[in-house]
Image (cartoon, helix red, strand yellow):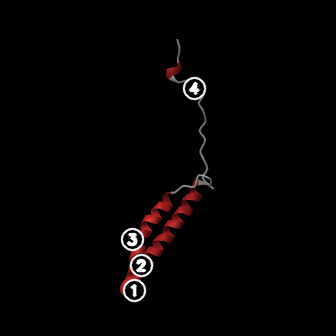
Amino acid sequence: MSPTEERQSRLGQYLLAMVLRLVCLFLCFITPGWWILLPVTGVIVLPLIAVGLANVVNSNKSRTVQTRESNVPSLTSFVP
């Protein structure tokens, strides 16, 4: 999976969590009694979960960038 595809996947997960948070926020205005604790919990907890999921990089799917070794000698390896 390319870095761009991985970024898009994480962005999609983040947006889904934020949409669920908006639904919970709207439910706070119409939920009666003690049931309001469920959407309030969603409003508080979902951002933490969304950011956590957005920042997790799956090392199995991500591609590592390989650097080329330079053939130019460094200044510290110079011996007169």
The Cα atoms of the two marked residues, 4 and 2, are separated by: 61 Å
Sequence-wise first label, 4 or 1: 1
- Residue, x 59% and y 52% (percent of image)? 59
Sequence-wise first label, 2 or 3: 2
Sequence-wise first label, 4 or 2: 2
Sequence-wise first label, 4 or 3: 3
Mark 4: secondary structure: loop
Question: For mark 4, what is the residue?
Answer: 72
Look at the picture and state if 8 lies above or below 36. Answer: above
Q: Are marks 4 and 1 in contact (CB under 8 Å)?
A: no
Question: For mark 2, what is the residue?
Answer: 39
Question: For mark 3, what is the residue?
Answer: 44
Sequence-wise first label, 1 or 3: 1
Question: For mark 1, what is the residue?
Answer: 31
Mark 1: secondary structure: loop
Amino acid marked by disc 4: Val
Q: Compare residues 34 and 31 and report the one nearer the observer.
A: 34
Sequence-wise first label, 1 or 2: 1
What crowding class fits label 3: few (fewer than 14 Cα within 10 Å), some (14-19), or many (20 or more)? few
Q: Compare residues 66 and 52 and report the one nearer the observer.
A: 52
The Cα atoms of the two marked residues, 4 and 3, are separated by: 55 Å
Amino acid marked by disc 1: Thr
Amino acid marked by disc 3: Ile
- Residue, x 46% and y 65% (percent of image)? 49
